Image: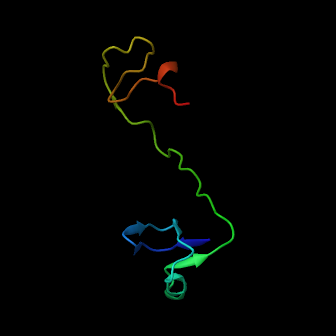
Amino acid sequence: MLIAISTIFYHNHQYLPGELLPEESEEKEKWIECGSAYETDTIETPPKAKMAAAMPGLPGIARGNLETDDNLIGRIPDNPVRKRK
């Protein structure tokens, strides 16, 4: 598998860093030589980002938030209907 290290524009498609490049390309050796791509046997999946800060929202009086006691403006209240699956 050929993975892009830098942005590559090839056949009217822009490949971003980390994306798979076409194996049958005539440019394959040139990309590897100049350091724009590398070959590997396995696909590495990047780790998922976790929230590192507090939940967004401003303290204040919220309207229509009868289900919980959270008083935050600009934050959607957490309830079972809005939970992601």
Image height check: is 59 above or below 4?
above
Residue, far top: 66
In front of the other: 25 or 66: 25
Percent across and percent down for residue 66 are: 40, 11
x and y percentages locating residue 29 in the rendered image: 55, 86
Colour scheme of this structure image?
rainbow
Where 30 falls versus 59 (above or below)? below
- Residue visible at 39% across and 36% down in the picture: 56
Residue 5 in view (yes/no): yes
Q: Quadrant of the C terminus?
A: top right
The location of residue 40, given as percent across then percent down, is: 65, 73
Q: Residue at x 49, y 83 (%)?
A: 27
Which quarter of the figure is the N terminus placed in?
bottom right
Q: Residue at x 50, y 74 (%)?
A: 5
Does 26 appear above or below 41? below
Residue at image location 37% in from the left, 21% down from the top: 71
In the picture provided, is 3 more to the left or to the right than 62? right
The answer to whether one can see residue 79 in this image is no
Q: How many marks?
A: 0
Q: From the viewer's perspective, is 75 left or right of 28?
A: left
**Dividing the picture into quarters, in which one does residue 70 lie?**
top left
Left-right relation of 77 to 42: left
Seen from the viewer's position, the closer of residues 27 and 80 is: 27
Residue 3 percent coordinates (x, y): 55, 71
The part of the image, by quadrant, that contains residue 62 is top left
Judge by depth and name the residue closer to the eye, 40 or 80. Answer: 40
